[in-house]
Amino acid sequence: MPAEAPAALLELQDIACAHAGRRVVDGLSLRLQPGEIGCLLGASGCGKTTTLRAIAGFHPLAAGSIRLRGQSIASAAGGLPPEARGIGLVFQDYALFPHLDAGDNVAFGLHRLPRRERRARAQTLLEVVGLGDCAARYPHELSGGQQQRIALARALAPEPALVLLDEPFSSLDPELRERLAGEVRDILRRRHTAALLVTHDQHEAFALADRIGVMHGGRLLQWDSGPALYRTPASAAVAGFIGDGRLLPGERRSDGRIATALGELRGRSDGPPGQHVQVLLRPEHLLHDPAGPLHAQVLSRAFRGAETLYTLTLPSGAEVLARIASACDYPPGASVSLRYAGTPVCVYPPA
Ligand SMILES: Nc1ncnc2c1ncn2[C@@H]1O[C@H](COP(=O)(O)OP(=O)(O)OP(=O)(O)O)[C@@H](O)[C@H]1O
């Protein structure tokens, strides 16, 4: 008998959502395990926020169902009101109450507890997010990063099994963003609280999430771990969205290799000889080698510290990327010699 899948904390089954009669989320299914951090990633308008709002109970389902801890919380027939779902929310538009100090903001969701206990629990949560000495400060007396941490403390205070976060770091500067993302991940992990986060920043998704869902046009293209998404994107669309890389046209040979403008490459999957394909070429597929057989011209470059990421043009006109030690300095227009690293490439149907 096959082993049963572990019980999911959150299960979205084939959900669809519409705005003004137009489906903006369609056929979306995913499972989040207890304590797991998931992330919906995708370009603006792909339906991430609508999906999160449907889970929270602020948007109706046109089809499908949502289960939390095995209980149905939403279907096309209706659902539990948001406050009955037991889900913590850190939404962009779910700002702190300006007329309440940080302590009362955090205590807000604890109305069932006596006042003294509420303040004590709020204080504990403020300490969890590293703002134990800010209880009496009002939102306008706090920085953006501090306000977001208070919002997280407020969401965590009622001890929900799941927290939803919608672009929680988008208003912060990049350095603070990365630090806060790490802190939030550690806080969630320590409390074994599951979370589903929405972002369009893949670095944020990689830094935070156990599982990432790439969305496009209202559909979930792939739901996988960060390393799996990077190594084996399920489609050319996911490949184009995750990590650095370029798609090159190619043709399968009878020996299984794939002929491209870079020569013959090893494919990760098989297919009939003569088949036209595209291959995903990551920068690590190409090695800088002054004696290498491949020659390309520098189109542009981006300094990344110890290494520089070069965009190069092959004699065929195709573009590829390569990471080269920054000690070697190739200006635009210069010729660079390379060789194929020999590692297999992902293969997709032609565009
Ligand atoms: N209130 C609304 N009325 C009509 N259409 C809407 C409304 N809100 C969102 N939409 C449309 O639904 C689609 C999905 O929007 P959604 O906000 O879920 O996307 P998103 O991926 O979260 O985008 P962003 O990253 O910009 O927040 C978009 O095409 C958007 O224009």
Image (spheres, helix red, strand yellow):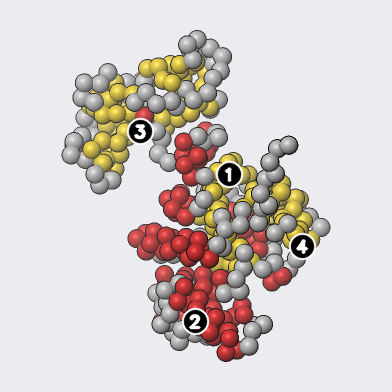
> Label 4: how many residues lie within 10 Å, few (<14), some (14-19) or many (20+)?
many
Mark 2 and mark 1 in contact? Answer it, CB < 8 Å.
Answer: no
Q: Residue at x 18, y 36 (%)?
A: 328
Relative to 251, does residue 177 appear above or below in the rendering? below
Of marks 3 and 4, which one's residue comes earlier in the chain?
A: 4
Above or below residue 130? Residue 19 is: above
Q: Secondary structure at mark 1?
A: strand
> What residue is shown with label 2?
123
Number of the label disc, if any, that sits on residue 284: 3
Q: Nearer the viewer, mark 2 or mark 4?
A: 2
- Say if residue 113 shows up in the picture: yes
Among the two numbered marks 3 and 1 on one chain, the one whose residue lies closer to the N terminus: 1
- Rendered image: mark on residue 223: 1
Residue count near mark 3 (Cα–Cα under 10 Å), binned few <14, some 14–19, many ≥20: some
Query: What amino acid is at disc 3?
Result: Glu
Q: Position of residue 66 (x, y in %)?
A: 72, 55
Q: Which numbered marker is on residue 285?
A: none
Q: Of the residues shown, which amino acid type is indicated by label 4?
A: Gly
Instruction: Tell me, yes or no, if residue 247 can be seen here.
Output: no
Q: Nearer the viewer, mark 2 or mark 3?
A: 2
Q: Earlier in the sequence, mark 2 or mark 3?
A: 2
Distance Cα–Cα, label 2 vs label 4: 33 Å
Above or below residue 301? Residue 138 is below
